[in-house]
Amino acid sequence: MFERLCIIGIGLIGGSIAKAARAEGLCQQVVALGREKNLPNMQRALELGVVDAVYTDTARAMAGTDCVIICTPVGSMQAIFTQLKPYWNPQTLYSDAGSTKGSVVEAARAVFGDVPSNFVPAHPIAGAERSGVEAAKVDLYKNRRLIMTPLSSTDAGAVDKLGEFWRRIGSSVSVMTVEHHDTVLAATSHLPHILAFALVGMLGRKDEQREIFKYAAGGFKDFSRIASSDPTMWQDICLANKQEIIPLIQQFQAELGRIEQLLLRDNASGLFDAFSYAKQARQRFLETFDDPT
């Protein structure tokens, strides 16, 4: 599909894209572009065979590149677009893997005046608690969802080609608006991460006085797994999508308050109804949506 794929941000997400693209024969060469301070990580990617070359010089990285995927935290997107602008090639396909899309689109507009037609915003719904290129997996995107959020001005051919790329590395591709993406992901991903960070932070402070973690059951480990996610990435995501996240936090606080009142009143039937509804809702989710294919 591509002669030369350039990954900007060769960590878990970017490294896994590189590995999958290479395994499926979707590019002749994979290169990484990053800042000088990230050179040791890029050199490690080179040692592991994840990429064929690494660059800190944008001009050299872009020479001959016909696909660029930006895999940096969303807070750095405007700086990346500014870096790429002098070398932007109308014949090259550009995309990203950011977990928010509104902030990415606004960053592109701030740099270019309007979003270039050959930039296709996208978000692979995949990840792991480990980060860095050593955590990259060739099958990270197998049977996972990939959301593209093209604008009305986005080139249809670029959308089709990017969709084909992700399908060939195993993803189920969906298309939605930027606004709908950020609303949905705030509820299904961003809020759950905040809850995990908050709970583990609270219990961590208690654990300094008591052996709480020593007796944590498997359910706690499962729920708290996402609190091991990269703090820099999630700081950027939460700030970028706060207009969608804050109302959800307020709704969740109200739901906790309702359960608190049921406990204060020893309302067993109310608790049973609340827990039963949640169990049934989750079962409907599993039956309807658990298989992305």
Image (cartoon, rainbow, N blue to C red):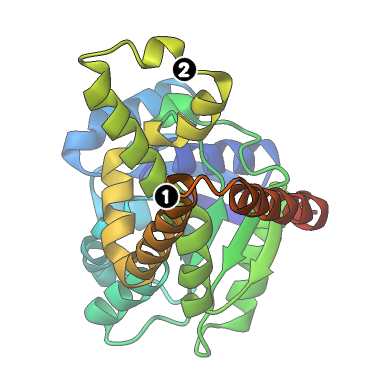
Say which element carries label 2: loop
Quadrant including the N terminus? bottom right
The number of numbered discs placed on residues in the rendered structure image is 2
The picture quadrant where one finds residue 106 is: bottom left
Residue 285 in percent (x, y) is at: 73, 55
Which tag, 1 or 2, sits closer to the chain's start?
2
Q: Residue 260 — which label?
A: 1
Give the side of residue 139 with respect to residue 95, left or right: right
For the C terminus, give its image quadrant. Answer: bottom right
Q: Residue at x 23, y 48 (%)?
A: 57
Residue nearer the viewer, 62 or 94: 94
Image coordinates of residue 107 in percent, x first then y, are 28, 73
Amino acid identity at mark 1: Glu
List x then y, in percent, for residue 36: 17, 38
Which residue lies under the disc numbered 2?
216
Residue 232 position (above or below residue 66): above
Q: Residues within 10 Å of mark 1 (few under 14, many from 20)?
A: few
Q: Residue at 50% across / 27% down in the picture?
A: 220
